[in-house]
Image: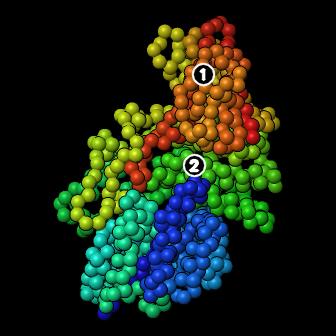
Amino acid sequence: MKIDLLLGVHAHQPVGNFESVMVEAHERCYKPFIETLYRFPPFRFSAHFSGWLLSWLMERFPRDMALLREMVARGQVEMFGSGDCEPVLAAIATRDRITQIEVLSKKLQAHFVRPPTGAWLTERVWESTVVASLADTGIRYVAVDDYHFLCTGLPSDALDGHYTTEEDGRRLDLFPISEALRYRVPFAPAHEVVAHLESLADAGHRGAVYFDDIEKFGIWPETYDWVYIRGWLEQFIEGVLASPKIRTSTYADFHASNATRGIVYLPTTSYIEMNEWTLPAPAAATYSQLLEREKHAGRFEQVKPFTRGGIWRNFLSRYPESNWMHKRVQSASERLSRVPAAPADLTELLHRAQANDAYWHGLFGGLYLPHLRRAIWNNLLRLEAELDRLAPRPGLLRADVDLDGVDELLLNSGSLQAAMRLDGNAALHELSFYPLRQNFGDTLRRRREHYHQRIEQNEQTAHDGEGIRSAHDRVDFKHPISESDLETDRRPRASFLDAWQASGTAEPRPLDTYALLGADGTLREATLRCTAGELVCDKSIGVSDNTLTVRYACGGSVGTMQTALNIAMPSCDGYSGRYVLEDGSVPGGFGQLLVLDDARGLTLDDRWMGGSIRITASRPVEIEAAPFHTVSLSEAGFEKIMQGVALYLRWAVDKPGNRTEIRLSFHADS
């Protein structure tokens, strides 16, 4: 009896990724993979390219896409659908699931003649709520991990074909991706993988299901040399085709010729690694320790289905920055749905803002990569600018936008939007300038991650034996990292975050008891007051055209007021970002330290962004500027990433009987 090898590969690049990275991905992975498989017409497989990447490849590399089109035409390749810009379908509205799937299905039909009947689920995130949207758009089956099935109590030897589920009267069939294959392909020697498949055939299995990132075939560390230079892929193909026990098949053909193995209802989950990544650091440590104990005791395979960890949506509750993006995009989706016959380009902007990569973090940079978050904001702000033209928003809105139990105040001038969380800090966590499509508040708080303990233990991994290491097994360092780099932030990385240092005290204390006195939608201004001991500080925040103005009136005590501005600049520490002084001189870039005494202004010029911001004060202030970094994990190792510029403005309050007043302005130019 032969076993059907269902080999599926998933290709995706994040919306907003650097052009050079995408070109390299094509040259080291997509192109050689397609060219190699093209030479072996009998080797059948399935492929998914996210719609955003597919459109880019069609434009940039039409010859290689022509090869793929020919492979589809001769029946060698089945193309899978999904959401066009690779959203987590479960995390977006039903109406957006449908439009995302339909856009990619139409692209596939236009380029490859036929629409897809199978779909890739982003990060294999399964929630039963997605069934109806998939079925209603013509999708008949998807692939998720065998882990999903094990969690229902099914035994692993029963996972050699597809099962059926239903929701709200719609049917969808589900294929279980083999974890054993996922960890072998392409990391184990080719002959060992072929032998594993033959052993499954000997055991009477009907199918061997594989669907995973194509980037493992050339982009992950060590894989280009292993897969192409040293010939793993050719060896694997030739070994499979030569085996009398293996035949290759597309998912479509297997699905058509094999009956379902029965009904199944999967729990909400993703792949097992994701279930650890999504947990907060303390819980992730406990979870990891539990898994290690069970592995050491030899019980892991037995208990694995019952130790599920977290779910993907936990990222939204773990990271307020992610949650804020998510809820802002949800709001824009709702606004767009009320626009009759909305132009297709507005829907595309929404789809791009729903791309999954910047909303979470695990093995890859994700949320920690500023350029990926910036792409979300870029598309969201372009969309909102168009929606404002069709149906302008009020100048002031008070609502709990992110559902955290604390209201936000949004001040909007049409060109500038400032969002302040009414949590006592009177600070801005969003400062969006629509002409530049830039949220200057798009920074990231430094927090403890579970994998930081590996840095503290100075772990390094070696690899003995045959094959290469998977990125899951690597512990490498891209940058030197010190203990101070792992310090966490005690306060949000917001702007106009105040502190007070009374005369004779050693350190400033946070001012975090501001109460809202009033807000005026016509003036687009809010007024707040903080009382800290003898100090009384009134603060007003307003927006007008391209300018944010913050006024302070403080008295009752003697000391120093400090406000911090944590500002996201697209150039980060690159050569395109620089400070400009009032006399026009350039003291350095955003990646350098800067200290100014008695300054009335400072310009942050960013040629990558194509604009600048100018911060001015109505009286001389001390300005201190420094870059701030986070430490995160990527497939290539631990790395330090500049998240933004931290500016500290300080001025004396030295007349206890009178109030010291100062006006600070933040002006954006495009």
- Callout count: 2
Residue at which label 2 appears: 371
Please provide percent x and percent y for residue 104: 62, 72
Position of 455 with respect to 593 (left or right) is left
Q: Is residue 175 above or below residue 268?
A: below
- Residue drawn 42% across the image and 67% down it: 217
Residue lying at the far left in this picture: please name it. Answer: 297
Q: Any mark on residue 656, and which? A: none
Q: Quadrant of the N terminus?
A: bottom left
Does the rendering let one see residue 5?
Answer: yes
Identity of the residue drawn at 57% across and 86% down: 73
Residue at image position (53%, 40%) is: 643
- Classify 10 Å Cα crowding around label 2: few (below 14), some (14-19), many (20 and above): many
Q: Viewer-proximal residue, 68 or 327?
A: 68
Q: Is residue 370 left or right of residue 196?
A: right
Nearer to me, 68 or 482: 68
* Disc number placed over residue 623 in the picture, else none: 1
- In this view, 627 is above or below 384: above
Q: CA distance from mark 1 to mark 2?
A: 27 Å
User: The residue under label 1 is which amino acid type?
Assistant: Ile
Instruction: Point out residue 319 in the picture as x, y percentages from the top left corner.
Output: 50, 47
Crowd band around label 1 with a 10 angstrom C-alpha radius: few (<14), some (14–19), many (20+): many
Q: Is residue 578 left or right of residue 201?
A: right
| Image position of 284 (left or right of 338) | left
Give the percent coordinates (x, y) of residue 492. 53, 36
* 302 or 182: nearer the viewer: 182
**Secondary element type, mark 1:** strand
Label 2, secondary structure: give it: helix
Disc 2 residue type (three-letter): His
